[in-house]
Image (tube, coloured by chain):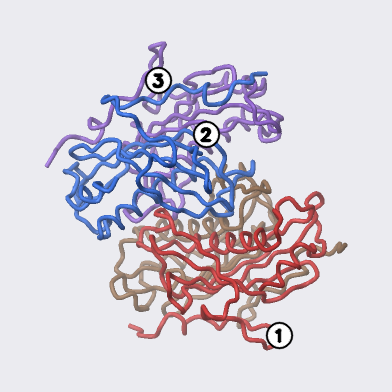
Chain colours: A red, B brown, C purple, D blue
Amino acid sequence: MSEQPVETILAPQPRPASGAELPNRRGEFRVLRTITTRWMDNDQYGHVNNVVYYSYFDTAVNGFLIEASGCDVRELPQIGIVAETSCRFLRELSFPDVVHAGLALEKLGNSSVVYRIGLFRNDEVEPAALGRFVHVYVDNASRRPVPVPGEVRKALEGL
Amino acid sequence: MSEQPVETILAPQPRPASGAELPNRRGEFRVLRTITTRWMDNDQYGHVNNVVYYSYFDTAVNGFLIEASGCDVRELPQIGIVAETSCRFLRELSFPDVVHAGLALEKLGNSSVVYRIGLFRNDEVEPAALGRFVHVYVDNASRRPVPVPGEVRKALEGL
Amino acid sequence: MSEQPVETILAPQPRPASGAELPNRRGEFRVLRTITTRWMDNDQYGHVNNVVYYSYFDTAVNGFLIEASGCDVRELPQIGIVAETSCRFLRELSFPDVVHAGLALEKLGNSSVVYRIGLFRNDEVEPAALGRFVHVYVDNASRRPVPVPGEVRKALEGL
Amino acid sequence: MSEQPVETILAPQPRPASGAELPNRRGEFRVLRTITTRWMDNDQYGHVNNVVYYSYFDTAVNGFLIEASGCDVRELPQIGIVAETSCRFLRELSFPDVVHAGLALEKLGNSSVVYRIGLFRNDEVEPAALGRFVHVYVDNASRRPVPVPGEVRKALEGL
């Protein structure tokens, strides 16, 4: 029986080409969004189901954009569709924990925005999960990629 | 305005060290699991929300394991906890589509199982999404990693 | 300690004014819709969480309407908004059960449609749950009540 | 086209036999629980899907019980299973609203607890929804009804 911690079994997370360090710990994120867990988030094993972590990502990113841009980004002619996401699950979360989602900008492209996300349980400083969330902006009608809209670029300056 | 398709904007998915090709198209998966979409899977933009794709992954893997092992894997003393997942979203899904989740074995380790997952919309052969789902087996009481249980290894022979 | 079954503790369900009997058992429903359960539907007690039953209701009603009307009811200028729902939980459901949702018409009003819903586990004939689902049709723009659209009325003839 | 408001179309909510008035407005609830909405709570029509309201009910009741009893009610030998729920949907909720769930005790029986629930959007005083949530306590092993445990009865004194 292995006594190796889970984290060392997993392949290391790819680092950005620039070599810049991505934030991991709570204090390294400039923006934190508060999310309340729900009773039904817990699965049969008594902790928050893996799927639900992505709803925290989704909520943190969109909640931040709506608040920081001062406009309802869903109403813009360019909408952000989710092109890719990933998550490493490091510690359990469980209802009634409060989750604090740290947001950072990993990469801002022409049409895409890559967020780094850390989830923190209650007042813990080590992440319960670390994730990546990629938005690609498309024209709402044609669904073809377009440049990241100005309202969003401006909001991202806060990250 | 870019006319570049979304997929080329994204970084290529890492390939396994062995150089073996992972399955992409419907016919390349040996196991397909059928999942019905739900009205509430659709989000404000009228397609299945990105979070919900992971519930299809979760359901396909666990449903397969229960069926192929002939035992309720939740009752084993070793349980599979989800250590890492990722998804690339390639085409829209929308209620009332029927989703077919293709399952393949990307890697079988001592304590971990890495699944390759493809989601197919109705009778389409190109994937709506491609994902990765990593189970690490732990002792249900101590939550320390343990070898993949025999019941699960046997089930995986079908992939 | 009481040995009284759960059902007798609850107040009886109101009957329709007409005195007509509402369907309860599987064979009494003219329409049955198949829904696959999901791993995350199960909560900490190992059965499908009460909230999820309502997603089966929602899915059964809207899936039926789309199929039976031959049109995407979401695109009509009149949309059905949910005004009231209720459910009595009689037997447990658990992943990987397959749920069959029976649909019947309890009442067709000028602006409203009241559905009777029974949920059946796998091939069981006694309901796991009995529910009520009230749609009120409104103008999509003004959100004021309007008559039930013809496309929906026609679909309801099948119930 | 009717100009009648949605509420008058619906049958009146049954009142308790005692004739006591149930709370409706925000100030009439002694306990309010705060719940953050999530991006994926919104459905295709841009407001919170009806199913999700029940997750707010579930979360408010269980969160209150855990906090007010000072113990994790999930660990007791008697667990509360949901026997019946209902909801009238009166006003829209939409992400990123914050929901305040008012809790009141409608009836305390031998084995059952009936909660009255009101959901309030942000700082509004009129309810977005009014609901009923019935817990029946059962022995965790036998699943037969048992008296409401003392820890829960004590917590309910705060309602």
Judging depth in this view, the residue of C122 and B50 nearest the camera is: B50
Q: Point out the image quarter for the N terminus of chain A.
A: bottom left
Question: For the residues marked 1 and 3, what is the alpha-carbon distance in whole angstroms?
Answer: 65 Å
Image quarter of residue B126: bottom right
- Residue D90 numbered mark, or none: 2
Q: Are marks 1 and 3 in contact (CB under 8 Å)?
A: no
- Residue A17 numbered mark, or none: 1
Judging depth in this view, the residue of C93 and A130 nearest the camera is: A130
Q: Is residue A93 above or below residue C75?
A: below
- SS of the residue under disc 3: loop
- Residue that mark 3 sits on: C22
Tell me if A69 is positioned left or right of D21 in this view: right
Amino acid at pointer 3: Leu
Image quarter of residue A70: bottom right
Question: For the residues marked 2 and 1, what is the alpha-carbon distance in whole angstroms?
Answer: 52 Å
- Which x, y percent locates residue C38? 46, 51
Residue name at image x 58 percent, y 69 percent: A86
